Image (spheres, grey):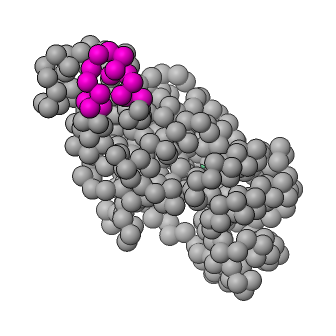
Amino acid sequence: MIELLGKSLVELQSLFEEHKIQKFRAKQLIDYIYHRHIFVFQDMTQFPKMLRDWLDANCIISIPKIVAQSISPDGKTQKLLLELIDHSRIEAVLMEQHYGNSVCVSSQVGCAMGCVFCASTQGGLFRDLTVAEIVGQVVLFSALKQEDIHSLVVMGAGEPLQNYDNVLQALKLIHDPITFDISYRKMTISTCGWVPNIYKLADEDLPITLALSLHATTDETRRKIMPVGSRYKLDEVLEAVKYYYEKTQRRITFEYILIDSINVSLEEAHELGKIGKEFPNCHVNLIPVNGNEHINLYKPSSKHMNIFKDIIASYGVSVTIRKEMGDAIQAACGQLKAAHGRKEEIHE
Ligand code: SAH
């Protein structure tokens, strides 16, 4: 069966031409999928019966299946646990912000990075997501909401720069005016610091926003909580991020999880302020760690978090503490999936 989700207009046109189907049908198909949210071929009534039957016999549109859903008490954050065609499970989140709907997508099933604070990586990496599966998360939310999607963050499970080609292809499709028409400026890729592909992304000359999961100010601490820290030194990571900034002129976001007794000394706040100062217009996003029964890590007191933040701000760096809107719905990476038990998955 041929997967139609995630294919560009040009790809659909050449597929149709190959099968002697009129080329203009490709644009109609994109309209059905991305705007009218019709995924059943027989419901595509603009198509002649013969075409609908051919599509039924040869093609599929694999919209991920919703297994569980949790909505925050204020109704503004919605997290979905989704099942893919091979029964793998991933998570995707929709956040209603004041500026519009923002979707957070996963890029892999599981993750190879092994960060100690992250629920998504606990079972290791199972596989990369396909272009269709990445795009499918956005299609699903736009179908559920029946509203435009304003922005996109690739910050769910997985390391997006390890699934570089599929992530980029998905973003290019989502950017296309005939699908979602989301500008690259409203897309963010979050990475743990996969250095070679930070350079590669910079050289694409696309104004995508880069978020770096920094989480420590020394190699010693970073290595303790993020195994990738043994592969790439902090200096190398920051040099790559600097190159990204210089090439794209996009404001860099630094994510920094606040974990009590691990990375929140006042000295570390000063170091973070100094790092931020090196990146004009950057933003530091402080994230109180979300623990669970497997992740025995705790956030510092509110008082301490505010002192930490004020020190960074004293360097003239823009800094905020992330609202914990995810807490109520287990929005931290991988937690909904973990709560539903991994054993239900066929591959484990
Ligand atoms: N691999 C990419 C993207 C996935 S992780 C990266 O490392 O950036 C995305 C973000 O999820 C991380 O920056 C981290 O801030 C957040 N995250 C993961 N586990 C968390 C936890 N237990 N509590 C709070 N935030 C968490």
Tell me, yes or no, if residue 123 can be seen here: no
Q: Residue at x 49, y 45 (%)?
A: 171
Q: Which quarter shows the C terminus?
A: top right
Q: Quadrant of residue 237?
A: bottom right
The foreground one among 133 and 27 is 27
The reply to whether the magenta stretch includes residue 16 is yes
Q: Quadrant of residue 44?
A: top left
Q: Find residue 220 and report its horizontal and vertical position in percent.
A: 87, 56
Magenta part of the protein: which range? 11-26
Q: Residue at x 48, y 34 (%)?
A: 131
Q: Residue at x 63, y 48 (%)?
A: 204
Q: Find residue 15 and report its horizontal and vertical position in percent.
A: 37, 22
The foreground one among 28 and 76 is 28
Q: Which quarter shows the N terminus?
A: top left
Left or right relative to 130: residue 136? left
> Does residue 259 sit above or below 160 in this rendering?
below
The foreground one among 119 and 339 is 119
Q: How many marks?
A: 0
Left or right relative to 169: residue 76? left
> Does residue 135 sit above or below 331 in this rendering?
above
The foreground one among 309 and 290 is 309
Left or right relative to 46: residue 205? right
Left or right relative to 195: residue 310? left
> Does residue 119 sit above or below 65 in this rendering?
below
The reply to whether the magenta stretch includes residue 335 is no
Q: Find residue 316 and report its horizontal and vertical position in percent.
A: 70, 84
Return the residue found at the far bottom: 314
Examine the residues drawn in magenta and state their main secondary structure: helix
Q: Residue at x 30, y 31 (%)?
A: 26
Q: Find residue 240 and report its horizontal and vertical position in percent.
A: 77, 55
Tell me, yes or no, if residue 242 can be seen here: yes
